[in-house]
Structures are given as structure tokens and as C-alpha cells.
Amino acid sequence: MSDQPIIPQKQPYVKETKAGTYFWCACGRSDKQPFCDGSHKGTDFAPVKAVIEEDKVIAWCGCKHTNNECFCDGTHSTL
């Protein structure tokens, strides 16, 4: 297995997000991007838990190389 995630897209997933708990896909294999669908099983990847306290628009990382937990930090522009 590769120690690098698959890059589903080189831009964030900008979504209206309701308050709640989410599991962001870190491996890039999920069919339910940007969220985990269990496709990481058998890899060294695990989803990242994000607790969103209030309804808001979030830019979830789409390149899977962010240094900001699961949120876009612009890293995609350097890939």
C-alpha cells in the first residue's frame, strides 16, 4: 500500500455543513467525498473526526494533503 493518499480533486469541497460530527476521508478512496465510506480498510489511513459546533460553510480538503486537520489550507495549489 502507498503511504500517500489518492488525490480525488485539487480543490476543496466547499459545502454548507450542519452542526454535528463528521468523519473526513484521509485516504482519498471514498465514493462519498469528502467524507469517509470505509474504503480505507486495509490501508494505513484512518478518517479524521471533525466536530462542527454550528451550521456554516466549510472548505473540506479535497487533495488530502492539508496540514490543517481536514480543512483546506491551500496545499492543493502546490501539488
Image (tube, grey):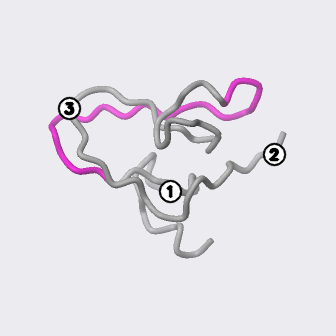
The residues tagged by marks 1 and 3 sit, at their Cα atoms, a distance apart of 23 Å
The amino acid type, in three-letter code, at marker 1 is: Asn
Indicate the secondary structure of the residue bearing disc 3. Answer: loop
In which quadrant of the rendered image does the C terminus lie?
bottom right
Q: Badge 3 is on which residue?
A: 19
Q: Residue at x 25, y 40 (%)?
A: 17
Q: Residues within 10 Å of mark 1 (few under 14, many from 20)?
A: few
In which quadrant of the rendered image does the N terminus lie?
top right
Q: Badge 2 is on which residue?
A: 2
Can you tell which quarter of the image residue 74 is in? bottom left
Residue 47, horizontal then vertical, whole percent: 54, 32
Q: Residues within 10 Å of mark 2 (few under 14, many from 20)?
A: few
Residue bounds of the magenta highlight: 40-58
Q: Badge 1 is on which residue?
A: 67
Q: Viewer-proximal residue, 61 or 69?
A: 61
Residue 66, horizontal then vertical, whole percent: 51, 57
Q: Residue at x 33, y 54 (%)?
A: 14
Residue 58, numbered circle: none
